[in-house]
Image (cartoon, rainbow, N blue to C red):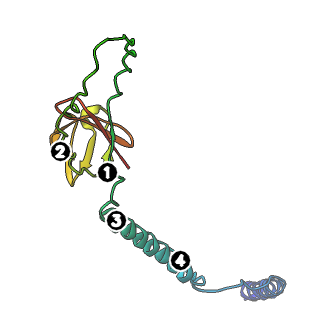
Amino acid sequence: MSLIADALKKAEKQQQFGSAAAASVPPPLSQGKPPKKNNGPWLLLVLILILTAAAAAFGLWTQARKPLPAAVQATIIPEPPPPPAEKPVAVESPEPIEEMPPAELPPQKPPAPALSLTGIVRGTSAKDSLALINNKTLREGDRIEGFTVSSIREKEVELRDESGEVRLLSY
C-alpha cells in the first residue's frame, strides 16, 4: 500500500505544480475558429472597376461606329502656266493695221465632280493603304468619277485624270 500512497502523493504534487504553472501562463487569445476576414469592400471595389472599364469600352466601341465627319473641300492644283512669250518688236508699217476679231477661246471643261475624302487607312505598304472617297473604299490604281487614285498619303490622297491634271483631297 505504501506504493499506492506514494504514487498518489506524487500525483498530487504534480497537479499542484501543474496548476501553478498553468496560472502563470495566460490563456490563448482565441479558441476555436479564427475570425472570418471581411472581403466585402474589396470585392465591391473590384466589381466597380470592372463595370467602369466595360462601360468605357462600350462607349469607345459605339463612338468608333459613327460615320466620320464631312471632309474638307478638295483642292485642285492646276498645272503651272507657260512662261510669258517675249514681247514682239514694234515694226513700223506704212499700212494701217486692221482690227482683228477677238480670238475664240477654247471650250471650257465641265466642272470637276464633287469628291469628298472621309478617311484614310495607312497599311504597311502602298497597296495595303485605303482611302474612303464618296463612301467608296479605294486603293492606289482604283478609279472614281474619271480620276485614278495615284497615291494615298497620311492626310491626303492624290488623284489624276486622263489629261494628267492632279487633284489633292485632304481632311
Depth check, mark 4 against mark 2: the one in front is 2
Residue labelled with disc 2: 110
At label 4, counting other C-alpha atoms closer than 10 Å, the crowd grade (few under 14, some 14-19, many 20 or more) is: few
Q: What residue type is labelled 4?
A: Leu
The one nearer the camera, 44 or 93, is 93
Q: What residue is drawn where x is 34% and y is 55%?
A: 71
Q: Which amino acid does label 3 sit on?
A: Trp
Residue labelled with disc 3: 61
- Check whether the beta carbons of the residues at disc 1 and disc 3 lie within 8 A of each other: no
Image coordinates for residue 168, horizontal then vertical, percent: 32, 40
Image coordinates for residue 67, horizontal then vertical, percent: 29, 62
Depth check, mark 4 against mark 3: the one in front is 3
At label 1, counting other C-alpha atoms closer than 10 Å, the crowd grade (few under 14, some 14-19, many 20 or more) is: many
Q: What residue type is labelled 2?
A: Pro
Q: What residue is drawn where x is 79% and y is 87%?
A: 19
Between discs 4 and 1, the one toward the N terminus: 4
Between discs 1 and 2, the one toward the N terminus: 2
* Relative to 62, residue 79 above or below: above
Depth check, mark 1 against mark 2: the one in front is 2
Depth check, mark 1 against mark 3: the one in front is 1
Q: Rounded to the nearest whole Å, what is the CA distance between mark 1 and mark 3? A: 18 Å
Q: In this view, does 160 lie to the left or right of 27?
A: left
Q: What residue type is labelled 1?
A: Gly
Residue labelled with disc 4: 45
Q: Rounded to the nearest whole Å, what is the CA distance between mark 4 and mark 3? A: 24 Å
Q: What residue is drawn where x is 21% and y is 31%?
A: 101
Q: Tag 1, which secondary structure?
A: strand
Q: Tag 2, which secondary structure?
A: loop
Image coordinates for residue 41, horizontal then vertical, percent: 56, 82
Picture quadrant of residue 14: bottom right
